[in-house]
Amino acid sequence: MSSESKTEFALILMFMLASVRLGISQQSGTTVRHHQVAVDEDAVSPELRQAEVALQKQDYRSAEVLLQKAVAARPNDYRAWFDLGWVCDATKNPEGAMAAYRNSITAKPDVFESNLNLGIVLAKQGNKQEAAKYLKAATQLTPTAHVDEGRARAWQSLGLVEESMDPQQALTAYAQAAKLNPKDPEPHLSAGALLERQGKLEEAAREYQAAAALDAKDKDAIAGLANVYSKQRKLPEAETQLKKLLELDPNNPNARTQLGRVLAAEGKQEEAETALGAGKSGSNRDPKAALELGTIYVRAGNYTVAEEQLRLAVKGMPLDAEAHFALGSLLMAQKRYPESQDELLTAIKLKPDMADVYGNLAIVASENKNYALAISSLDERAKYIPDSPATYFLRATSYDNLKNRPKAIENYKQFLAVDGGKLPDQEWQARHRLIAIDPGNASQYGEKK
């Protein structure tokens, strides 16, 4: 069964880091010569000149051979090393790319593109500390073309690297990127996603709103707003954003599912059914939507229609552990324990680390008088979730029914030690069973005053 935390889908905004060619205009895609690239074109070696022609044709194999010759002949040729780094990156050779970019920076430390690209490659390889060093350097250098956009890109890349190390610095970097390139929604989207993860929902909403103001059809901005509004329980606002998102992307299953959840939370049951693509007849072609709709009906207490939908989900997704868990839990609520046990066992077989399933399975197995299964389920649950008074009591009664008195006594005692009066009926039962099965210590188990 979906937990309450699953009533809001998690939007994951990912912005891929991509290298830039030295002297390549990001807008026109044509090579731009600049004084930083070569003061004297006549000083460019024939191998480098031929390599750059090959690069323009994306003939990376020929370019690499020529560039290796160029750097062997001129070890301090920063431009040749840079081009070699670009070739290695393009041919999925990150180690070669990092080495080449490092040599380029050693030969000429103040080239923006070399520092930016090395930082990006390092970030891709998970070396965030060193990546930040070169990206910070890039933010203080001058790109060979489109200066503000280039620096904005450096700040944006730095923000992505800093997120896990220093979130506040990441937000500062995103603000710098937005300032340098005010027409780009990406810095606002990144800042919004980071703030949302930090639980700063009002600030996140402002960033998403800023992105949406720059591009009213930006699906990431709209989805971000929908997500934040859902978390804030601003359901009408979330509904508006989700409907807008579906207008732009009618086949977005996450948005459709989220809209169904929001509508259901607003009490708009029929609209929720429509959004999820199913009516009360249960004729749902989308098993994921059937699972969601079944969950909605469970919450509404309509178990009959809920079961129809959950069985459609199981039929359509026979290998989906969540679907079997949901159906098994519903059957447990209906006291149909043998059927419930089968579904819960299937869920665990499909996904053995679903901790919540073990708790339900222990209850169902106990009702089916399968006490050994109840105990093993509780023991598996304890690997993921600490035992509670209820699990100690259920384990104790299971051992008691199996005539394993030492284990029953142990767990009854643990239950009494931690319950603290929360389950008075079970405490009464535990004390009386202890008196019965451990008469030598009966005086310890008297009624609690």
Image: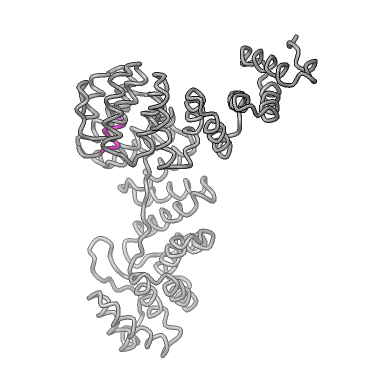
Question: Residue at position x 27%, y 76% from top?
Answer: 55
Between 403 and 268, the one lying in front of the other is 403
What is the number of callouts on the image?
0
Location of residue 301 in the rendering, given as x and y in whole percent from the top left corner: 35, 16
Please name the predominant secondary structure of the magenta segment in the image.
helix
Q: Is residue 182 left or right of residue 359?
A: left
Question: Residue at position x 42%, y 62% from top?
Answer: 120
| Position above or below: 123 against 230 | below
Q: Which residues are magenta?
A: 253-258
Q: Is residue 256 magenta?
A: yes
Q: Quadrant of residue 443?
A: top right
Between 235 and 305, the one lying in front of the other is 305
Query: In the rendered image, which quarter contains the N terminus?
Result: top left
Looking at the image, the residue that sits furthest to the top is 449
Question: Residue at position x 36%, y 40% from top?
Answer: 11
Between 360 and 154, the one lying in front of the other is 360
Looking at the image, the residue that sits furthest to the bottom is 73
Location of residue 109 in the rendering, given as x and y in whole percent from the top left corner: 48, 72
Location of residue 34 in the rendering, given as x and y in whole percent from the top left corner: 32, 73
Query: In the rendered image, which quarter contains the C terminus?
Result: top right
Q: Is residue 237 left or right of residue 57?
A: right
Between 170 and 404, the one lying in front of the other is 404
Location of residue 387 in the rendering, given as x and y in whole percent from the top left corner: 61, 31
Q: Quadrant of residue 83?
A: bottom left
| Position above or below: 24 against 252 | below
Question: Residue at position x 30%, y 81% from top?
Answer: 63
